Image: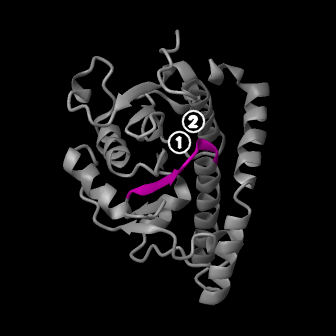
Amino acid sequence: MTAPSEPFPGESQGRIDLAAAFRLAVHNGWHEAVANHFSLAVSPDGRTFLMNPKWRHFSRIRASDLLRIDARDPATMQRPDAPDPSAWSIHGALHRHLPQARCVLHVHSPYATALASLADPSVLPIDQNSARYFNRVAFDLHYGGIADQEAEGERLAKAMGNKSRMLMGNHGVIITAPTVAEAFDDLYYFERACKNLILAHSTGRPLSVLPDEVAEQTACSWEDYADSAFAHFNEMKQILDAKEPDYAQ
């Protein structure tokens, strides 16, 4: 397949990075059949974005396969290559209303979804990973079925507010960031944090929750290590380059 023309600076590299994120999601066990969606804004205003085509398994996605979509185009779902309705509902609304959310990763990863299924899905700071998210996660506890209506996407964009992560009750998680590298790294650690919480909850014993001041200090320290996200993602892309180089095609 020939990649579409590049009207926006950096789109070619953005395609490669987003394709890598799909493949790495498979490596980490975050994918779910042919569902879930990742997107990346390529226009300066954030409203034109790349996204996976309808019902393509993450393990097969290549850079040239990604759709280019205008979040303001009401005819998007009439395109011959129209995306999945829930992908358009969620990602279209986020890219329309949240220009800072340039990369949007939405998955039903096992541990985040398990935590989202609890009556109280709080991301309690019980270790270094979970403390990263102290007071830094939005929660949407109003699941009403598959998010395939435009109004639902609009509601989710409002629920996200000024946060960059949202745990979706009875559903999954949305991670947003300025770049694919930062979003991938954040999703990696969010799923690790949720795993630690679920394992701790499963013991049935009381949790040792960090004091608020320690949790906040730890979260701030994580922000001092922000550049590590790029090193993490680059290392993982090198693994892909050796094992699955076709992702970049």
User: x, y (%) of residue 234?
Assistant: 75, 40
Secondary structure beneath dot 1 equals: loop
Which of discs 2 and 1 lies nearer the camera? The answer is: 2
Mark 2–mark 1 distance (CA, rounded to whole Å): 8 Å
Q: Does 40 appear above or below 4? A: below
Please give the name of the residue rendered at 62% of the width and 50% of the height, measured from the top-left corner: 182
Rendering quarter of residue 48? top left
User: x, y (%) of residue 204?
Assistant: 58, 82
Q: In the depicted view, which residue is nearer to us: 54 or 117?
A: 54
The answer to whether residue 208 of the structure is visible from this angle is no
**Scheme of image coloration:** one colour
> Which residue is disc 1 drawn over?
31
Rendering quarter of residue 79? top left
Q: Earlier in the sequence, mark 2 or mark 1?
A: 2
Magenta span: 171-181
Residue 133, disc: none
Residue 22, disc: 2
Contact (CB < 8 A) between labels 2 and 1?
Answer: yes
Please give the name of the residue rendered at 28% of the width and 65% of the height, measured from the top-left corner: 142
